[in-house]
Image (cartoon, rainbow, N blue to C red):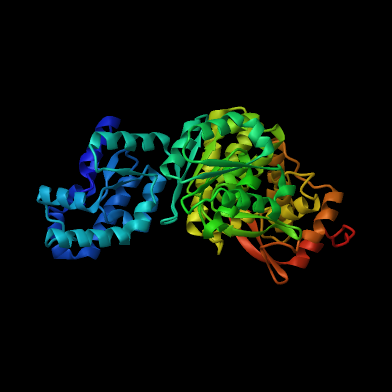
Amino acid sequence: MGSGKSTLGAMVAARLGLPFVDTDRELEREAGRTVAELFSSEGEPAFRARERALALRLMRDGVVRVVAFGGGTVTNDEVRHAALDAGTLVTLRAPTETLVARTAAAGSVRPLLGGSPEAMVQRLRELSLARAAAYAECHGTVGTDRPLENALEDVLRIVARRPVAMPLGERSYVVDVIDGDPSRSTDAIAALRPSSLIVVTDANVAEARKDDLASLLRAGLAPSRVVTLPPGEVHKTLPQVAAIWDAALGQGIDRNAVVITLGGGVVGDMGGFAASTLLRGIRFVQLPTTLLSMVDASVGGKTGFDHPTGKNLVGTFHQPSHVVADLAHLSTLPDREVRAGLAEVVKIALTCDAALFEDLERAGRAVLEDRTHLQAVVRRAIELKAWVVRQDEREAGLREVLNFGHTIGHAVESGAEYTQLLHGEAIAMGMVAELALGERLGLSPSGLRGRTARLLEALGLRAEPSNAEMVAARPFLGADKKRRGSHVRVPLPSAVGACTVHPLELALLEDGPNFGSLPSAPVP
Ligand code: GLY
């Protein structure tokens, strides 16, 4: 109310050459009564039902347009999520006094306000608090307490960027998927107004992406300290986390400090974990530099490090404040690492999106040579991950499907002592081995294992572990976060693009077709 949405919405529509609909006006036109009359004659629930039906219709009729939603419209989860999926959702903000002044000047009757200016301020503050979590779930927020021409430019910039939204209430953030724009990262960090920055990277990335690192530091956003970790999964350990803690605390950080992770999944997981524990939790921004961390590790807030008994066994859920996936980083990434990243794309496609799986089957390795196609694939993988995480942030159900291939994959990776295989390479083999089990148990359709193996091989990934790799992996099968007593919760695709989680006897995995014929290895 008074945010300027009707005026600004019309301005956006004019600039983009699109039709404009203001849902309040459209409801009044359809009903032949004002919003205030509808409220008093039908009551708020009936009004909200009309509003919801109209909003969903506007988003599903295939017409590209600009819509100004009433302030309560996006408090409906279904409407808000549909808007996030169908288009670009921008929240407008202005101080309460400005809202009241504008509302009073317009002389319009606002059913949820009414009363004296003081009562209106009070009521608006209450509404704003009650709606804060819903309003935070958007692609961008624009202040309108200034000339609307300036706000217009900000809205248009958000529309042009089209980031992927991760709607998690007041912990919401966006993921920018771009190709070669270092200023996006500095703008995103600057918007957080950090008091200081702890930039976590590794020695390989610091060398390969030195220009990006230098431009980040040159931007002078805040006093900064760079922590350069030794590279590789073998160093994803508590001493490296402690090195980040020491650097941050030695710098005298306060709670407005921000950790920046510039690197792959190892850097992101450890930097995120350090951020989640420093001063009981400070903000962090993920700048993933590997394909694998762009499509999986940097999004969704899983942080942690490895323990000698298994991978990622100590960690937290701590969401980043922003993620910038810049494909330009891939130009200095070894080919082998890029291919390994495709394993996580295959995983999300196979478990959630048949169209993406088929797209990869058609393209094969050519997807890596066509940057526009690759950007679309990365974006789609991130959208799917965000769709899963928004429904199950803490992995109480749906998010478990993202562990497909990881029960056997983690064991293969651990068995190879984190030095012989990249994470994605182990996951590729884990997916094929788990599909073999799924087919044997009649939980996955026959032929899916072969089809997946063919795709992985077409993408340049090995689908079958060697006997030696399997022997080494076996003792690690039980050291899995997904284990519950003698059972492990194993996600198995029931079709391309669909997946169900099954509690399976650990013994079934250990003695199944993958491991059953192998001599047992000594427990390390
Ligand atoms: N990497 C799996 C997840 O984020 O849940």
Q: Residue at x 12, y 62 (%)?
A: 115
Q: Nearer the viewer, residue 285 or 113?
A: 285
Q: Is residue 367 visible?
A: no
Q: Residue at x 88, y 61 (%)?
A: 522
Q: Quadrant of the C terminus?
A: bottom right
Q: Is residue 388 visible?
A: yes
| Number of marks | 0
Q: Nearer the viewer, residue 272 or 109?
A: 272
Q: Is residue 129 above or below residue 292?
A: below
Q: Residue at x 45, y 48 (%)?
A: 173
Residue 219 place in picture, x, y as percent: 48, 33
Residue 316 place in picture, x, y as percent: 58, 59
Residue 130 place in picture, x, y as percent: 31, 62
Side of 477 relative to 245 (left or right): right
Q: Residue at x 79, y 50 (%)?
A: 417
Residue 427 place in picture, x, y as percent: 70, 48
- Quadrant housing residue 232: top right
Q: Nearer the viewer, residue 252 or 28?
A: 252
Instruction: List the single residue furthest toward the bottom.
Output: 485
- Quadrant housing residue 505: bottom right
